[in-house]
């Protein structure tokens, strides 16, 4: 099964154009998922296969890694997986290395002078991000314990070298290369968790450089020294957004990126032509952040650049990864903005210890981010205010440890909500924020099953409301109305006590612009 390129998204096109985009994306997905023997990005192949319901057993890949030995921590075989394109066998979709050309023509001279440094600048961050995200996901989510343990073992062994590689991008050596690594890490949650300190340092360093340059990131090396770069600006904005940092700089960078779109719907750096990598950087940022961005011209450009076999190629070694990324971009462009909106991430240290959810300050930061974009500021946003009925009584009867377990389970349930984010507002109170333009939040909340919250708790610890005689069933034994509203007072009861636009002292679900507050 292949993802559908749904109608009604941000692609204003004829039916024939939409069908062409669907066909291009599906063809690319099939190509990537059916590739055998990919040396640099086998984890991308497995991810594609898994996403489309095909067998994706990591066992053979793990067996191959286990049979390898590692060398110097700074050498090309520092990991059990391949990280260098220098000694690869001939791979048809990559092309012969002698045919590789710089995706930005101004850099062709640099490529000819030091080809493998340029290739490594492109390939290494992709391999690091894709492999660590793949392993991190299996380590925490694989259904079989042996798979989880093998993934953890590979990560543990590689961690010291991963830290060395992550630190390489903190030194301010190369504005495009460093922010490209930041971009790769920030778009893969498990990779960002591993590289978080280095991503944070890189983002802070280049955010200051962009501030000094008036809201755009210039290049730092020949041939783009002190030249404003749309690519690096988009990469930095994506990293800052993922890290939940500095809404105002994100807004300035994104507005500059939007202003650099060419008439063709693509992006390029300086006076160079539109290229696929810069277009991916910029379109991915705007498509997932600005509901007013129209992607029809960009989609048209991407369709023109797909080769006869179905690949997208910027230089050569990145071909399989780039093809998967552009196919995913086409999928997103055909869907709703609410589904593709990219929520800012927060490090574990910045989340509530009991629930793993963001604190209220996250909502304040979101409002500041929305205010940077008229489209976001004016987009309707659904809010829901929830609490756990009679949680205080349960906590007193069962103990804080059991109360913490209920909070943890409830938060885990809230995290399953599509197109929404949950925020802990203190105690047993939660705020649920829908993606901009999304609808149906109340219905999705009421559709959550109650079992995962109270299930597994000892029966003696499940407090329930009792009714006496003709008493109002909406009140408890002492005549008090439970804070959560009518119904059982079992731990984990979800409540929405009012509807309409939330105001001071009102608890419920409503729809209103967030950025204009």
Image (cartoon, rainbow, N blue to C red):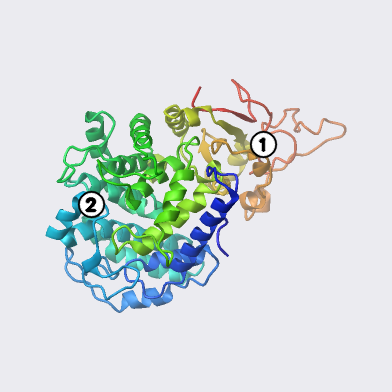
Compared to 500, does 264 lie above or below? below
Residue at x 18% of width, y 64% of height: 73
The residue where tag 2 is placed is 105
Q: Position of residue 218 (x, y in %)?
A: 22, 38
Q: Image point 44% across, 34% down: which residue?
A: 362
- Circle 1 packing at 10 Å, graded few (<14), some (14-19), many (20+), is many
At horizontal 45% and vertical 44% (from top left) the residue drawn is 297
Q: Residue furthest top?
A: 504
Which image quarter holds the N terminus?
Answer: bottom right
Residue 142 in view: no
Please give the residue where the numbered disc 1 appears in the rendered image: 495
Q: CA separation, marks 2 and 1?
A: 59 Å
At a point 34% along the width and 60% down the height, the residue shown is 313
Image position, residue 274 (x, y; %): 33, 47
Sequence-first disc among 2 and 1: 2
Nearer to me, 508 or 406? 508
Task: Find numbered disc 2 in the image and state the secondary structure of the residue it sits on.
Answer: helix
């Amino acid at each position: 099964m292949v993802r559908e390129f749904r109608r009604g998204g941000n692609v204003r096109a004829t039916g024939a154009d939409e069908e062409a985009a669907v066909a291009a994306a599906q063809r690319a997905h099939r190509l990537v998922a059916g590739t055998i023997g990919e040396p640099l990005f086998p984890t991308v192949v497995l991810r594609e296969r898994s996403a489309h319901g095909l067998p994706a057993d990591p066992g053979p890949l793990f067996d191959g890694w286990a049979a390898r030995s590692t060398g110097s921590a700074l050498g090309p075989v520092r990991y059990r997986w391949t990280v260098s394109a220098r000694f690869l066998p001939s791979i048809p979709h990559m092309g012969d290395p002698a045919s590789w050309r710089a995706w930005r023509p101004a850099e062709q001279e640099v490529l000819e002078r030091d080809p493998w440094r340029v290739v490594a600048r492109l390939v290494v961050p992709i391999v690091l991000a894709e492999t660590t995200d793949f392993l991190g996901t299996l380590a925490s989510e694989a259904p079989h314990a042996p798979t989880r343990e093998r993934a953890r073992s590979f990560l543990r062994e590689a961690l010291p070298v991963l830290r060395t590689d992550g630190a390489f991008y903190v030194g301010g050596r190369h504005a495009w290369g460093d922010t490209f690594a930041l971009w790769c890490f920030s778009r893969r949650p498990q990779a960002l968790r591993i590289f978080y300190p280095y991503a944070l340092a890189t983002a802070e360093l280049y955010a200051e450089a962009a501030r000094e340059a008036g809201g755009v990131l210039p290049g730092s090396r020949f041939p783009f020294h002190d030249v404003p770069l749309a690519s690096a600006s988009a990469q930095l904005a994506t990293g800052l957004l993922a890290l939940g940092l500095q809404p105002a700089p994100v807004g300035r960078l994104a507005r500059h990126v939007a202003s650099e779109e060419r008439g063709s719907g693509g992006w390029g750096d300086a006076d160079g032509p539109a290229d696929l990598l810069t277009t991916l950087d910029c379109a991915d940022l705007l498509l997932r952040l600005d509901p007013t961005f129209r992607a029809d011209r960009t989609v048209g450009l991407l369709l023109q650049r797909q080769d006869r076999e179905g690949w997208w190629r910027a230089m050569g070694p990145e071909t399989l990864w780039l093809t998967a990324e552009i196919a995913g971009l086409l999928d997103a462009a055909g869907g709703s903005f609410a589904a593709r909106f990219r929520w800012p991430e927060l490090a574990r240290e910045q989340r509530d210890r009991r629930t793993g959810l963001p604190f209220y300050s996250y909502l304040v930061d979101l409002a500041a981010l929305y205010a940077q974009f008229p489209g976001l500021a004016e987009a309707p946003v659904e809010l829901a205010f929830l609490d756990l009925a009679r949680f205080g009584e349960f906590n007193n009867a069962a103990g804080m440890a059991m109360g913490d377990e209920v909070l943890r389970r409830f938060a885990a349930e809230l995290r399953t909500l599509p197109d929404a984010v949950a925020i802990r507002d203190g105690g047993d109170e939660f705020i649920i924020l829908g993606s901009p333009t999304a609808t149906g939040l109340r219905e999705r909340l009421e559709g959550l099953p109650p079992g995962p919250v109270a299930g597994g708790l000892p029966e003696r610890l499940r407090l329930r409301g009792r009714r006496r005689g003709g008493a109002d069933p909406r009140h408890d034994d002492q005549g008090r109305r439970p804070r959560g509203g009518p119904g059982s007072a079992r731990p984990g009861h979800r409540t929405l006590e009012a509807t309409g636009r939330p105001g001071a002292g009102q608890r419920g679900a409503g729809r209103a612009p967030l950025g204009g507050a």
